[in-house]
Image (spheres, rainbow, N blue to C red):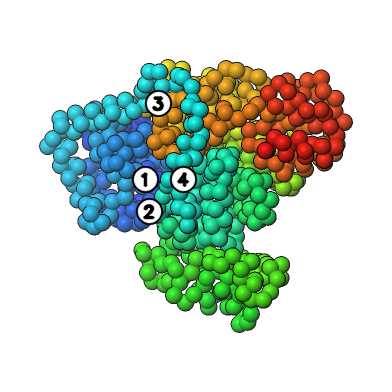
């Protein structure tokens, strides 16, 4: 066992028995590199990363490759989810050097931490147009010995480029958004939209929930979001038996996924589906949301109330083995008869299959379950009612899922990340409010209690990660902003002002520790954090709502609820700072597009005052309407917020736009009319 055996990160522990002499990230490793006068080999990945596993098996578990690494380098292994700040800095360097990024990420550094060569996956021998990893190691080691001066010079120049990328550009956060800004964003998205298969661009296709959320707020773009969600829900990217979405589709049809399942994808997509349900009333969206939440509860929820991070793509070294099927396996569960025949047809399971793990062809060709024909059309073809067909399918699915649960399961990354738990908190809270499901709301409340008890420090700041009973790593911008947004959703669902006030406290930490007035944006790390090459700022969403978008949205909510003009000013500056990037790469900035739409939306407040029982009929009405930027204010008494002050309760609704309010009402039908006018 190497030094990683003392770590808590599941990813680092996966490498604890490598013959590589790994070090965790820290000053001791760099001191060792200076002592030995050798470069650092920095390897960054995460526990459910398929290609990280491939490179580990091919290279890091190979004695001869490990000997080369140990002789010529100090080797550092980093979990990108545990240290996203380290990952962001060296990802910027990798992208500057290669024009692309991804994981595993392989970066060679001077003992001062300055990068001079980088890439992602390297094969064990020359192939795919890449050098074999042992040959690369030997080449870098030789160059370090023979051309040190040039390497150090290049590393210093590249480091300056990394720093330059994060420096303020004078005046970028000033001015106003163009009047047609939102329309241009929708138009730019339509240019890259796949009108046939949904989604944006070509394969591989990612879910892009933040972009879909933005489109759902725009009448001119809602069709793109709904079409994409419907096709994703019928594709193999959606787990047709167990619920939840896999990471992405390797093709452009949402058919064959990369099989890892992440907390962040499923939490964000649940909220997107719930908003789609509000927009259309289509029960299919509600079903997908419920099944996704059931997956999260079944597979990732800790008894204490937190959520684990992810599930692996591989089972016993074979990608997708748990999730894929053959006709024989279907019939072994359902028997020879009409139920098996129906499942084979509905879910496209064939002898030829549609998937094979290229690294394990011995596992054979198997089928990813998908729905090639919509159930309504299939019911007509079979001469059966859709209700009857659905009932038969649901019974068969339950039996197949039970059988699948008895198979070997993919590994679970059992660390708790505060930021991703904020996304899950918001998803369960929204489900409690929109679907009227008290169980989901209770899970959300338990999550808030867990984070307050286990991840909140005495000064009110949050830790980034929790595992094995201990919190670790100083909280980042993403932790405070995303958890704050989750608390906003929980307040809107449950009416406990303590949750809204906690969100406001987190905003004050965001403003105090992460805001950079000169740059007009939020930094990803606080002033007390470890000093890296630079303090990064993230506006691009990647797979998760970016921390600047999350902070801007949190500031806007605080501004709306508490009349905090400074919070709205900082949020506006952030959007203005990124406005050129947003137009240039519109599909990567969905979170900031949502913030822009929030800024342009009317100031809407909907106060519902009374006991939970008195509010319930009114809350059921509000839940049917997509009001993404309305300050929903449920409360028992008319106090604690500007919108509540001095207003009688007893189950009374107050709908206000700007500084004008409709007449208060206790009648659900009257409230419905008021909300319908708002939506129009």
Kindly identify the residue that appears in the image at 77 percent across and 38 percent down. 673
The quarter of the picture where the C terminus appears is top right
Kindly identify the residue that appears in the image at 26 percent across and 56 percent down. 128
In-image side of 566 versus 491 (left or right): left
| Residue 4, x across and y down, in percent | 41, 43
Question: Closer to the N terminus: mark 1 or mark 2?
Answer: 2
Q: Nearer the viewer, residue 675 or 454?
A: 675
**Foreground tag (1 vs 2):** 1
Element type at marker 3?
loop
| Residue 413, x across and y down, in percent | 51, 49
In contact (CB < 8 Å): disc 4 and disc 2:
no
Where 518 falls versus 625 (above or below)? above
Between the C-alphas of marks 1 and 4, the distance is: 26 Å
Q: Nearer the viewer, residue 611 or 185?
A: 185
Between the C-alphas of marks 3 and 2, the distance is: 28 Å
Between the C-alphas of marks 4 and 3, the distance is: 34 Å
Kindly identify the residue that appears in the image at 50 percent across and 36 percent down. 183
**Foreground tag (4 vs 3):** 4
Element type at marker 1?
loop
Residue designated by label 4 = 190
Give residue 51's mark. 2
Residue 81 in view, yes or no = no
In contact (CB < 8 Å): disc 1 and disc 2:
yes
Residue designated by label 3 = 535
Question: Closer to the N terminus: mark 3 or mark 2?
Answer: 2
Question: Closer to the N terminus: mark 4 or mark 2?
Answer: 2
| Residue 678, x across and y down, in percent | 70, 35
In-image side of 290 versus 636 (left or right): left
């Amino acid at each position: 066992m190497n030094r990683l055996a003392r770590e808590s990160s599941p990813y680092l522990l996966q490498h604890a028995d490598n013959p590589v002499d790994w070090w965790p990230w820290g000053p001791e490793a760099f001191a060792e590199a200076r002592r030995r006068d050798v470069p650092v080999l920095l390897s960054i990945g995460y526990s459910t990363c398929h290609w990280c596993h491939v490179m580990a098996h091919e290279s890091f578990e190979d004695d001869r490759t490990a000997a080369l690494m140990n002789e010529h380098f100090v080797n550092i292994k980093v979990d990108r989810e545990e240290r996203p700040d380290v990952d962001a800095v060296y990802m910027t360097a990798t992208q500057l050097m290669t024009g692309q990024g991804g994981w595993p990420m392989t970066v060679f550094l001077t003992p001062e931490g300055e990068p001079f060569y980088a890439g992602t996956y390297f094969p064990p021998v020359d192939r795919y147009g890449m050098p074999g990893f042992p040959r690369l190691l030997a080449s870098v080691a030789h160059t370090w010995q023979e051309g040190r001066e040039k390497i150090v010079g290049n590393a210093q120049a590249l480091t300056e480029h990394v720093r330059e990328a994060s420096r303020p550009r004078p005046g970028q956060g000033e001015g106003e958004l163009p009047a047609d800004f939102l329309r241009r964003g929708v138009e730019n998205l339509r240019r890259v939209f796949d009108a046939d298969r949904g989604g944006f661009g070509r394969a591989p296709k990612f879910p892009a929930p933040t972009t879909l959320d933005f489109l759902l707020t725009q009448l001119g773009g809602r069709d793109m979001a709904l079409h994409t969600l419907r096709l994703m829900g019928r594709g193999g990217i959606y787990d047709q038996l167990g619920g939840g979405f896999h990471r992405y589709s390797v093709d452009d049809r949402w058919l064959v996924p990369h099989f890892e399942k992440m907390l962040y994808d499923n939490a964000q997509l649940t909220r997107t589906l719930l908003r789609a349900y509000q927009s259309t009333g289509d029960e299919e969206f509600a079903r997908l949301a419920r099944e996704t939440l059931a997956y999260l509860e079944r597979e990732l929820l800790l008894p204490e109330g937190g959520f684990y991070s992810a599930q692996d793509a591989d089972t016993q070294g074979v990608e997708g083995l748990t999730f894929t099927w053959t006709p024989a396996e279907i019939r072994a569960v359902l028997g020879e008869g009409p139920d098996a025949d129906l499942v084979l047809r509905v879910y496209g399971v064939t002898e030829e299959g549609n998937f094979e793990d290229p690294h394990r062809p011995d596992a054979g060709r198997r089928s990813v379950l998908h729905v090639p024909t919509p159930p309504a059309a299939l019911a007509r073809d079979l001469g059966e009612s859709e209700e009857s067909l659905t009932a038969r399918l649901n019974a068969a699915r339950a039996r197949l899922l039970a059988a699948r649960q008895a198979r070997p399961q993919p590994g679970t990354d059992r660390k708790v990340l505060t930021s991703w738990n904020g996304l899950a908190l918001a998803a369960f809270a929204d489900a409690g409010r929109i679907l009227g499901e008290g169980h989901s709301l209770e899970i959300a409340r338990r999550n808030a209690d867990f984070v307050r008890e286990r991840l909140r420090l005495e000064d009110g700041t949050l830790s980034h990660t929790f595992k094995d009973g201990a919190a670790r790593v100083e909280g980042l911008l993403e932790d405070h902003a995303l958890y704050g947004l989750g608390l906003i959703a929980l307040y809107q669902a449950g009416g406990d002002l303590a949750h809204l006030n906690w969100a406001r406290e987190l905003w004050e930490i965001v403003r105090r520790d992460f805001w950079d007035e000169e740059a007009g944006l939020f930094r990803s790390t606080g002033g007390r954090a470890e000093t890296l090459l630079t303090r990064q700022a993230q506006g691009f969403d990647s797979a998760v709502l970016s921390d600047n978008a999350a902070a801007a949205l949190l500031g806007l909510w605080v501004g709306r609820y508490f009349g905090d003009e400074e919070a709205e000013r900082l949020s506006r500056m952030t959007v203005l700072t990124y406005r050129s990037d947003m137009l240039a790469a519109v599909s990567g900035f969905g979170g900031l597009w949502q913030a822009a739409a929030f800024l342009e939306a009317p100031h809407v407040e909907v106060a519902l005052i009374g006991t939970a029982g008195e509010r319930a009929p009114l809350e059921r009405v509000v839940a049917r309407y997509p009001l993404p930027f309305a300050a929903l204010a449920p409360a028992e008494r008319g106090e604690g917020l500007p919108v509540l002050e001095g207003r009688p309760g007893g189950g009374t609704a107050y709908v206000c736009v700007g500084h004008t309010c409709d007449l208060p009402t206790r009648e659900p039908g009257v409230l419905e009319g008021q909300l319908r006018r708002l939506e129009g």
